[in-house]
Image (tube, rainbow, N blue to C red):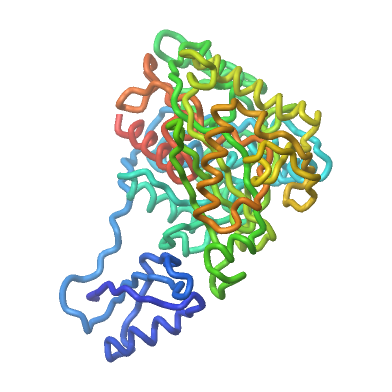
Amino acid sequence: MKFNTIQLKLPTNYSNEDIKKIISEDLGSSDFTFHIDKKSLDARKKDDIHWLINVVVKSDHFSGKSYEPPTPLEIPTRKRTEKVVVVGSGPAGFFTAHVLQMAGFKVTIIERGSDVDRRNKAIEELETNGKFTAQNNYAFGEGGAGTFSDGKLTSRSKRISDERRFIMSEYVKAGAPEEILYMAHPHVGTDNLKLIVANLRKQFQENGGEFLFDTCMEDIVVKGKQVDKLICNTGEIEADHVVIATGHSAYDSYRMLIKRGVQFKTKNFAIGHRVEHTQELINLAQWGKESLPGIKAAEYRLSANTKSGLSVYTFCMCPGGTVVPAAAYDQKSVVNGMSYYARDGKYANAGCVVGVHPDQLVGHTCSPNEILDWMDALEEKFYTFSNSLVIPAIKIYDYAKRKESKPMTHTSYNLGLQASPLYDMLPHMVSNALTEGLQNFGRKLKGFERGTLMGLESKVSSPLQVVREKDGKCEGFDNLYFVGEGSGFAGGIISSAADGVRCALKISSE
């Protein structure tokens, strides 16, 4: 069957029947099929907000080439005897294991946390009464930190189109909405992700994979250039290949790997706070209306360069979402954002952060261990502010004036806010840049200055990057790999998963 691609401009509340009608009138026939290839919202003009949709139409009425679907990812598959252990079940870890299993390897995933059901119960307790559980929290547990997030599946990484298409299709098979295959800014939400990661795990196990929960890597045994075995809280595990995918919150894993000779270097990362507004304010600023039919909630992405040379930007914006306590360890305080697929909550939040290098924060050329210690102390400082998971907060308009705000009760954060001099809780080079950036954002997005800054946002990315060879191995090792956000080579669900896919393909091609 021949095909043609057309672009349609449609109202926000269009239906598939509207698409069929337009195609039928244009083609002069109802003998066709179609699927959406790309879909993006054009909100540049508030009085003309619409969808731009690329539609692939297939019909015998067209001349030219026949439609051919995209080429699937090539995975070299054969019977193998090598055993691979993957440490961590987040996107990077799971997709490394998944592709290796498809390639014929015997694969075991070890996860320091529990399955998503037990993890969910622990997080409910955390949100209800502040009870922290070391192995099950917003950082650790099945699916990694991404399971309890907005589930944004966008990526600015280039040259990963084949990997991205594979990852998206696997998510759809596991229960994600098909729209993620074509939306310009796809997301799945925590409610879907909890089901998706469980379905992916069950498929992995049905295909012969081993999944060990509550199994924490505590050490590795190195012989020459080989990792001989892993020392876990549950015993020893031998492997022919070891892939580390612990995420960037596992500071204990970083320290152990450094001690065992794995090379890391410091790199740029970001710190700051969460900023929260009512979703209604964001909708009005972006659309000129409180709501639009056919669109869940308005989004934003803001950035500014400051006189100091430091960049300020928003990150991981969660429309209709909630602010959550995301520390990986007890008596630490870190915040993050999450939302459900409907994005129908009362509030919107985003990370509001400053890009810095560890040397700027520490004051000299620092080692990987030094920046980890510095970050630990900062997260402890935010916890000891209230000696609980009640977090410091301030209104944006007061932050600029260096003035404490009145008590704040209107928030999505369940464990409470306490008015504080948040401007004095980060290094002044950071808070000064943030002040300048916030003023810039207020000029770009009407009402932004009415938002609330809260807590510590310190997990935007890793301050470290592992030293990797071109073939993906950790420098100095013949069978050790490090992938995903913790490696410093990826950020977000899709780029982390793609890093894992590429690592698996490299191992498979050896």
* Residue 254 appears in the figure: yes
Q: Residue at x 33, y 33 (%)?
A: 506
Question: Please, which residue is most extreme toward the left here?
Answer: 64
Q: Is residue 446 above or below residue 202?
A: below
Q: Is residue 198 above or below residue 404?
A: below
* Residue 194 appears in the figure: no
Q: Residue at x 53, y 21 (%)?
A: 361
Q: Residue at x 33, y 87 (%)?
A: 24
Q: Quadrant of the C terminus?
A: top left
Residue 505 image offset from top left, x and y in percent: 34, 37
Q: Tell me which corner region of the image, top left, top right, bottom left or bottom right, holds residue 392.
A: top right
Q: Is residue 191 above or below residue 431?
A: below
Q: Residue at x 56, y 58 (%)?
A: 446
Residue 421 image offset from top left, x and y in percent: 71, 34
Residue 412 image offset from top left, x and y in percent: 72, 51
Q: Is residue 130 left or right of residue 58?
A: right
Q: Is residue 197 above or below residue 347?
A: above
Residue 204 image offset from top left, x and y in percent: 52, 44
Q: Quadrant of the N terminus?
A: bottom left
Question: Please, which residue is most extreme toward the top here?
Answer: 224
Q: Tell me which corner region of the image, top left, top right, bottom left or bottom right, holds residue 80.
A: top left
